[in-house]
Image (cartoon, rainbow, N blue to C red):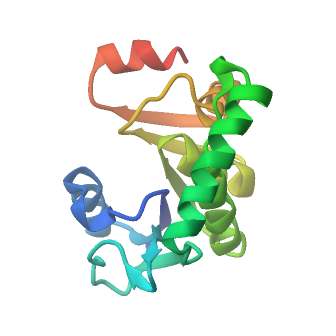
Amino acid sequence: MKKKVIIIYPDHWFSYSPTLTNIFELLSERFEVQVVAVELLLNGKPACVRYEDPRVIYARFPSIPKLGWRFLNKTEALFNRYIGKSSRRISFFRLIQTIVLYLKCRKLEADEVIGVDAVGFLVAQRIFKKAHLVSLEISTDDWFYQQLVKKASHIQSILIQSEERLRLLKL
């Protein structure tokens, strides 16, 4: 019986990420792989083309009208300006992504889990305790990145694009 691997991808453009789609396809040759990705709806329609494979499941991000996005952005800006510290910028969008992914993944079972970037890893770590990290984007002033650094002991392995980016992670 093949080991089950879950990849938690925190963004809505999985089908446009050659790194992740290639990892998914290569791992599928040896493991039972499932991807959980975010699906963002804009005016009730998916913002990106779906990766059409039954092993890719989508955590639906709430559909927010254009006016709602403006309000969310203004509120986030005020929050970060007056309440958040500049070294701990928090993105409300990322916060909602984290909640949506957590709710979708919390009942899943796996032998190995891969979290993509800070949000994917933090969701994986919260549910499965230990996870592998694929780092595509680094935003060192982000609250989620700072939580990732705090949870570094829970990282089983890191797949990253270069030594320079690894040094930037400061793990």
Q: Is residue 39 left or right of residue 110?
A: left
Depth check: 30 or 116 in front? 116
Q: Is residue 121 above or below residue 37?
A: above
Q: Is residue 12 left or right of residue 107?
A: left
Residue 140: where, in percent of width, then height?
Answer: 52, 22
Q: Is residue 71 above or below residue 67?
A: above
Q: Residue at x 25, y 62 (%)?
A: 21
Q: Residue at x 46, y 71 (%)?
A: 40
Q: Is residue 121 left or right of residue 82?
A: left
Quadrant housing the C terminus: top right
Depth check: 26 or 37 in front? 37
Q: Residue at x 64, y 50 (%)?
A: 92
Residue 66: where, in percent of width, then height?
Answer: 49, 69
Would you say residue 1 is visible in this rendering? Answer: no
Would you say residue 20 is visible in this rendering? Answer: yes
Residue 86: where, in percent of width, then height?
Answer: 65, 19
Residue extending farthest to the right is 83
Residue 161 occupies quadrant: top left
Q: How many marks?
A: 0
Residue 96 occupies quadrant: bottom right
Residue 159: where, in percent of width, then height?
Answer: 37, 36
Q: Is residue 142 above or below residue 60?
A: above
